Image (cartoon, grey):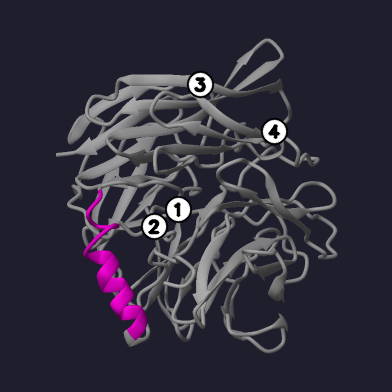
Amino acid sequence: MEYGFDRVVGMPSTPYTLLIYVTLSASSIIAKADWPEFRGSSYAGHALKSNVPLQWSSRDNIRWKAGVPGNAWSPPVVAGGHIFVTTATTNQNDLSLQARCYDLASGAQIWEREAFKVEDGRIHKKNSHASPSPIHENGRLYVHFGHNGTACIDARDGKVLWKQTGLPYKPVHGNGGSPLLFENQLFFSCDGAEAPFVAALDKYTGRVVWKIPRNVEVSRPFSFSTPLPIEVDGKPQIIIPGSGAVVAYNPKEGNEIWRFRYGEGYSVVPRPVYYNGMVYVCSGFNQANLFAIRVDGRGDVTDTHLAWSEQKTIPKESSPIIVDDQLYLNDDKGVLTCFDAATGAVHYRERLDGKGGYSASPVFASGHLFFHSGDGTTTVIKPGKNFEKVAENKLNAFGLSSLAVIGDGFIVRTEAHLWRIGE
């Protein structure tokens, strides 16, 4: 393809995208059991080939459990028979920001590497100093620690290949949003207490390719969302929500393609999803709203490209997921809503089982949806217009990280451990 856009973002809507989807499904994506970044290769929580268990507990269907030192909520990533995580350990007033590699088969640690040493700083009680997910590509691991810096590490032995610390900003609640690796660049938002901006780095050197100010007037400019790549009329766009607006950027130069404003929404966390010509964006605190926005516009599209919106039981932390024309969202208290993705019609609202709040983003694997709560409860739902609960699984361990899906199970990160779930 002209722009190298080689990952499935949503189900196809044209014969051309159908051909792309079928080709990808038969080759690079489903041939692997890898989960190389936040929400997987699909960018949207879909494991396109998997045979995962539907039931487990803290004793049943557990392959292994391995301790992970430090404090972090970054989701694990899996590639080439290895698991990669970031973490943060403290020694007096020093904070060691690290990457660690574990063996997928046994859970044994293979290597650890400090990427940065910084002074310990204040964070929100639900956050950590290592919340963004790492990214694996072609033997390289990209780790991002927000205002503290970004690094590229050799995934084989932990050698640091480059560091970038030239994009400082004043954080609020610490770091949060994961980066995006697309083509030859690494994208992320730097939405701190003042002068928020988005940036792109050269993935080979760490050089800043571009840095663009947000230019959105809001009283609280801090946010933590993760960029999403989409393709419109054969050309790529990078969708990056922030406080007050979601903006589509040209990945090459960083110029704005379009923006949609949503008032004073701030601390935006959920990653958008893309389907049939629309992106679905949650607007953050105080009142979370969901907006279905058509992506074929230019300039300010607030008054022209809204397809539908909703403000009841919309998540402030967890990301949406789409399966078979239906959009699913679980709010922070565990209320699951199923919408018709095209119209916004509500098929049902039902409460999930977890008691620890919902920060993790759901995944779709083996024909089922998995919603993971803070107390370690995973509720398994069969997709459809009617609510059908299949299983309720309890690890009885606190954790806010999203699940990583592998070919025959899951990697789950809790407060002190990694778990491999599989029959």
Q: Which residue is mark 2?
A: 45
Q: Nearer the viewer, residue 372 or 70?
A: 70
Q: Position of residue 348 (x, y in %)?
A: 39, 74
Residue to which mark 1 is pinned: 361
Spatial CA distance of label 2 from label 3 is: 28 Å
Question: Which comes sooner in the sequence, label 4 or label 1?
Answer: 4
Q: Is residue 25 magenta?
A: yes
Tell me if I can see residue 385 in this picture.
Answer: no
Gap in angstroms between the C-alphas marked 4 and 2: 27 Å
Label 4 vs label 1, nearer the camera? 4
Q: Residue furthest toward the top? A: 92
Q: Which mark is residue 148?
A: 4
Q: Secondary structure at mark 4?
A: helix
What residue is shown at x 27% (from left), y 60% (from top)?
A: 48
Which corner quadrant of the image does residue 130 belong to? top right
From this viewpoint, which residue is outermost toward the left? 423
